[in-house]
Each structure stands twice: as C-alpha cells, then as structure tokens.
C-alpha cells in the first residue's frame, strides 16, 4: 500500500513525531529532573544498602535521555513508492531502563525464539 506522500504529509508527520516526543512522557521528565540529585546523594544514602555506584548506571541514564532525540542523530527514510520522507531518530538500544527500546528488543527476541528455536 502506497502512502499519500508530499510535503504536506511530511510536515504532518514531523508535527506528530514532535507531539509524541518522549520529552512529554512522565518517566522521561522525572529522570531528567531527579537523576542529578539521586546521583549526588547515592553514596551517602544508598551505597550501604545497594553497593557502590556503577558507572554503567550513569551511562544508561545518559543514553535514555538522548534516545529518540533528533539532535543526537537520525536516519532519513524515504518511501520507495511515493517518495514520502521522514526522519527517524536513533535509539539507545538500551535494555530494561529505556521502555521503548526494551519493548522493541523483547518483541524481536520473542519473534526469533518463536521462529528459530520453537519452530517445528
């Protein structure tokens, strides 16, 4: 099925992408707001119970905050039928911390297991 294409629809897609931006999601806003304070007080308040601060935590949070941001990189995608174009933001490919990337990976793994491992 071919898409409608054209510059008007491209503008609509960009508006929709911006409206659905994860900057409006509550988890993103909470992490962005409270993570610096959490990191600052971790040693004092949480280290005894949960162990030393692991650098991978900071890396995962930084990647989550940059995930899906067009400023961090994107791919230009064009429909071969009508020429309709849009920008697809690059993702962090994170597991567990980034809900959208984790869900995508979980679905891909389930598909692989059903087709390759459990196939008759």
Image (cartoon, helix red, strand yellow):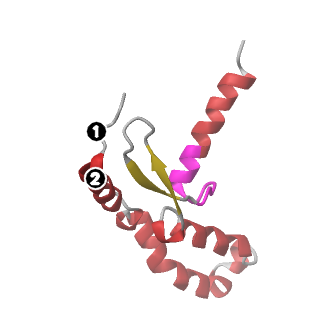
Q: Could you tell whether 82 is left or right of 15 in the image?
A: right
If the image is split into quadrants, where does the C terminus sit?
A: top right
Indicate the position of residue 111 as horizontal and vertical percent values.
62, 30
Q: Nearer the viewer, residue 63 or 84?
A: 84
20 shown above or below 60: above
Left or right: 25 in relation to 108: left
| Residue 38 falls inside the magenta stretch | no
Identified at 63% across, 54% down, the residue is 95
Residue 34 spot, x, y in % from top left: 48, 79
Per the image, label 2 sits on a secondary structure element best described as: helix
Contact between labelled residues 2 and 1, with CB atoms less than 8 Å apart: no
Tell me: residue 33, above or below residue 15. below
Q: Residue furthest top?
A: 120
Dot 1: element: loop
Residue carrying label 1: 4
Residue underneath mark 2: 7
> What residue is drawn where x is 24% and y is 52%?
8
Q: Position of residue 50 (x, y in %)?
A: 70, 71
The residue under the point 36% across, 38% down is 82
Does the magenta portion include 98? yes
The picture places residue 108, in percent across and down from the top left corner, at 61, 38
10 or 64: nearer the viewer: 10
Is residue 82 depicted above or below 11 in this figure?
above
Name the quarter where the N terminus is drawn.
top left
**Magenta range:** 92-104
Q: Residues within 10 Å of mark 2 (few under 14, many from 20)?
A: few
């Amino acid at each position: 099925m071919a898409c409608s294409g054209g510059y008007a629809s491209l503008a609509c897609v960009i508006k929709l992408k911006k409206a659905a931006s994860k900057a409006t999601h509550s988890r993103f806003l909470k992490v962005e707001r409270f993570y610096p304070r959490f990191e600052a007080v971790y040693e004092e308040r949480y280290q005894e119970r949960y162990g030393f601060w692991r650098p991978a935590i900071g890396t995962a949070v930084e990647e989550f905050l940059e995930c899906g941001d067009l400023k961090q990189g994107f791919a230009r995608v064009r429909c071969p039928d009508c020429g309709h174009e849009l920008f697809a933001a690059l993702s962090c490919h994170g597991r567990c911390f980034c809900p959208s990337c984790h869900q995508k990976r979980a679905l891909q793994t389930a598909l692989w297991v059903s087709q390759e491992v459990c196939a008759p």
